[in-house]
Amino acid sequence: MTVDHSDQAAAMAGPAAQPSPRAQGTLASAQAVTASSHAGAGVGGDPVLQIEGLCVDYGYTANPTHVLRGVDLTLRRGEVLGLAGESGCGKSTLAYAALRLLPPPGLVTGGRVWLHDEAGGRRDILTMTDRELRASRWVDTAIVFQGAMNSLNPVFRIGDQIMDAIRAHRPRSSARERQARAGDLLDMVGIAKDRLTSYPHQLSGGMRQRVMIAMALALEPQVLIMDEPTTALDVVMQRQIVEQIAELRHRLGFSVIFITHDVSLLIEIADRIAIMYAGQIVEQGPAQAMYRAARHPYTQALLASFPPLHGQKKELTGIPGAPPDLARPIVGCPYAPRCRFTMAECRVSDPALGHSVVATDDPSRMVACHLHDCHTELPEVLAQPWP
Ligand SMILES: Nc1ncnc2c1ncn2[C@@H]1O[C@H](COP(=O)(O)OP(=O)(O)OP(=O)(O)O)[C@@H](O)[C@H]1O
Ligand code: SF4
Ligand SMILES: [Mg+2]
């Protein structure tokens, strides 16, 4: 069940394509705004959740681990934004921090998380009062936690657990209304209403995960964050759940951040994809374009490590080395020790997220790599034409 955690943030005061000029800012904040305002342009509608320069540390010591290092990400109204990256890159931390659910010893040390309404107003989730936050949770934003299907209470019937969640946010609703709503929610995720009286152990893993999705949708939030919602399921169940999420999104019109380490899965469900590495977004853009023509060496390597969805079989390649230790200072590009194309400047300067150098790319395609700084030719594998 989604729970209210302690409020950490309150403590925070083809042939090689033609190059095009790349937007570059001088100040980190200016880059953050540029990246955010362009992210998603041409895909989807207005922003509904806008993360700007989000920084998170773990540990209250003098030497904390810098897990999020200035993340910029925009979710647009009605879209599914896929967030992928290797284990430990900070995906869950991003989700929790953005919704102010970060457990100790996590601490938001900078950034903004704007929640936009349809009338054009916006509120920063990180500076909401506790009361505003309570009123906003479930109604504006909801999350399905990683491993959520195991968080149902084993000694209560699932109907009671769903009704509890509804009662917490709609205390004036009658028992009959809650019962009807709980039944409708189960129905919505393809589970028969008579299962309201089942205990969690009487449901399959896929059904338990659907119950969690139903609970998250109980108050019809605008934004739903799903952290690895299908990872523990077999591929058949995975597909069913993904199709169901897509169908619900079309029917109810909410926006989704779908977190996974499985990039192939994202091609099936996401409108746009963002790739994360060592606590930063290194590439983002329309899903199909990212899949067909990666522009960042890490995205290209990540895609090469998954089997293709269609077409001929290909030999899979791993990514040599390991992600950097976020407890130590990182100088230069964090991917430099593993990158095939490392240059001298990569060792000293961390590339900012800017526009792809490939002229035909959608303006929403953003890349954090010095190869896109125009003064060098893009390697052929990163210059595949698209569309
Ligand atoms: N409570 C904690 N204390 C210290 N470090 C933490 C804590 N929780 C997470 N981390 C570190 O933060 C980093 C990011 O963790 P996070 O769980 O956000 O990654 P992730 O991308 O979601 O990984 P996965 O794909 O395995 O779920 C990791 O290096 C992890 O070791
Ligand atoms: S900035 Fe340099 S090291 Fe980093 S991904 Fe680009 S080419 Fe590789
Ligand atoms: Mg995670």
Image (cartoon, grey):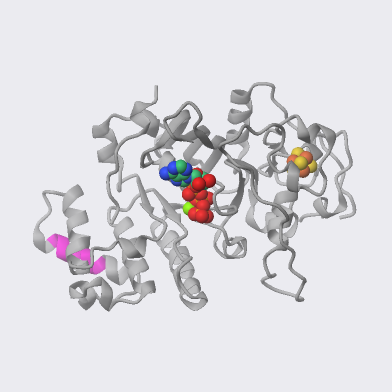
Q: Give the range drawn in magenta.
A: 177-184
Q: Name the magenta segment's main secondary structure.
A: helix
Question: For the C terminus, which image quadrant?
Answer: bottom right
Tell whether 95 sits left or right of 180. Answer: right
The image position of residue 224, as x and y in percent, is 41, 52
Q: Nearer the viewer, residue 194 or 8?
A: 8
Residue at x-position 30% and y-position 46%: 139
The image position of residue 197, as x and y in percent, is 17, 74
Q: Which of 184 and 341 is in front in this view?
A: 341
Residue 45 visible from this viewpoint: no
Per the image, is 182 magenta? yes
Query: Eyeballing the image, is 385 above or below 59?
Result: below
Indicate the quadrant where residue 20 lies: top right
Per the image, is 44 magenta? no
Indicate the quadrant where residue 371 lies: top right
Residue 286 visible from this viewpoint: yes
Residue at x-position 58% and y-position 55%: 271
